[in-house]
Image (cartoon, grey):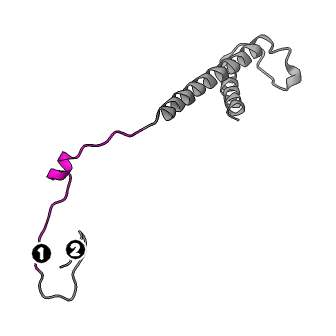
Amino acid sequence: TNFGLRGCSLRNIDWAVGLVGYTGHDTKVMLNSVKSRPKKSKVERTMNELIVTIFVVQVGICFVGALLHVAWMLFYRNASDYLGENLVARVTPSFFIDLGIRFIVRFGNWMILFTN
């Protein structure tokens, strides 16, 4: 007696006797089985909550830092020539695009600094 799996082929035989059994998801055994809950310890749940909290606080600090940088550049744009950051002197649409780009860059800088 041999057991042939799906997709196998028989070679060099004249005839064969076989029995086909269905073992899919609709069988009695599979329908009666219950999925078990993933088990997590109390420490794992606490650590997951703490990691999410730390990430949210980090994003908040980075957002405030980038916002303060943009505000500083707005108020002291003429006095910051020594930094090598030349802002447009007049308020134009390109000025706000420049501030938006600076916000995104500073936010990314703060994220990298606080992640390490």
Give the residue displayed 71% in from the left and 17% down from the top.
70
Residue 28 to residue 90: above or below = below
Q: Main secondary structure of the magenta part?
A: loop
Residue at position x 34%, y 39% in the image = 37
Quarter of the rendering containing residue 58: top right
Q: Magenta stretch containing residue 18, yes or no?
A: yes
Q: Is residue 53 above or below residue 11?
A: above
Kindly give the residue lying farthest to the top in the view shown: 75
The residue pinned by badge 1 equals 18
Provide the secondary structure element on which disc 2 rests. Answer: loop
Q: Quadrant of the C terminus?
A: top right
* Residue found 23% across the figure and 78% down from its top: 9
Q: Which residue is mark 2?
A: 4
The quadrant holding residue 101 is: top right
Q: Residue 86, percent across and down? A: 81, 23
Q: Which residues are magenta?
A: 17-39
Mark 1 and mark 2: Cα distance apart in space: 9 Å
Tell me if residue 93 comes above or below residue 110 in the rendering. above
> Toward the viewer: 6 or 108?
6
Q: Residues within 10 Å of mark 1 (few under 14, many from 20)?
A: few
Quarter of the picture holding the N terminus = bottom left
Residue 50: x %, y % from top left: 56, 27
